Amino acid sequence: MKLSSRSRYAVSAMIELALDGDQSGIPIVELSKRYSISQSSMEQLFAGLRRHGLVKGRRGRSGGYKLARKPSEITVAEIIKSVENPNGEPAKVAESGRTPSEALWNQLSDKLYEFLDGLTLEQILHYPQGNEESGESFNTRRFSEAPIETRRMGSH
């Protein structure tokens, strides 16, 4: 799974839309200003998000983008796939895995995808901020609606 700036901006923008809730939507111009990226770059991200059914937009003076589904139904992996991979498949470091390092990176990519596919926008919104000191993280914290079930690498 590829984690680029595109992915980070897309996930951040989707969190903003989730926080906006059922309001009128957030214009692309506003999102691009919040994240200091060009409007055309933000539009490219939203084209992928729209194509994968994650957002819906409304044109005009009171237009803007909203989530197309509930935050509990959208995973971080879906968001990343929509902006990184047009075919919707997780990216591999190398398809063949011929060398030990290629196999390692592919396995790590698979584990990362597995984790992000179990993490929804809803869970992110309800995750208490400032838990660095408590040692809680997304892979150990249990959420009321849908717990994240992940295994640490190397343990089965």
Image (tube, rainbow, N blue to C red):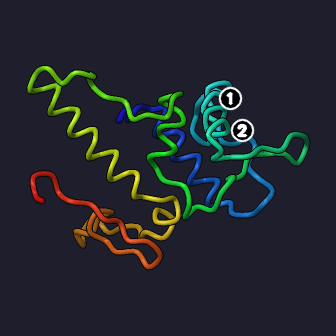
Q: Is residue 115 left or right of residue 76?
A: left
Residue 70, percent from left and from top: 63, 62
Q: Amino acid at mark 1?
A: Gln
For the C terminus, the quadrant is bottom left
Residue 99, percent from left and from top: 11, 21
**Circles 1 and 2: CB atoms closer than 8 Å:** yes
Q: Which mark is residue 6?
A: none
Q: Residue at x 72, y 38 (%)?
A: 28
Q: Residue at x 61, y 33 (%)?
A: 48
Label 1 to label 2: alpha-carbon separation? 7 Å
Q: State the residue position of label 1.
A: 39
Quadrant of res 22: bottom right
Residue 122, percent from left and from top: 52, 65
Residue 81, percent from left and from top: 48, 37
Quadrant of res 133: bottom left
Relative depth, front residue between 144 and 61:
144
SS at mark 2 in the image: helix
Quadrant of res 90: top left
Q: Amino acid at mark 2?
A: Ile
Q: Residue at x 63, y 27 (%)?
A: 44
Q: Which mark is residue 28?
A: 2
Task: Check the image and report above or below for 27 versus 130.
Answer: above
Crowding at mark 1 (Cα within 10 Å: few <14, some 14-19, many 20+) = some
Q: Residue at x 65, y 37 (%)?
A: 33
The mark tally for this picture is 2
Earlier in the chain: of badge 1 and badge 2, it is 2
Crowding at mark 2 (Cα within 10 Å: few <14, some 14-19, many 20+) = many
For the N terminus, the quadrant is top left
SS at mark 1 in the image: helix
Relative depth, front residue between 60 and 121:
121
Q: Is residue 75 left or right of residue 153?
A: right
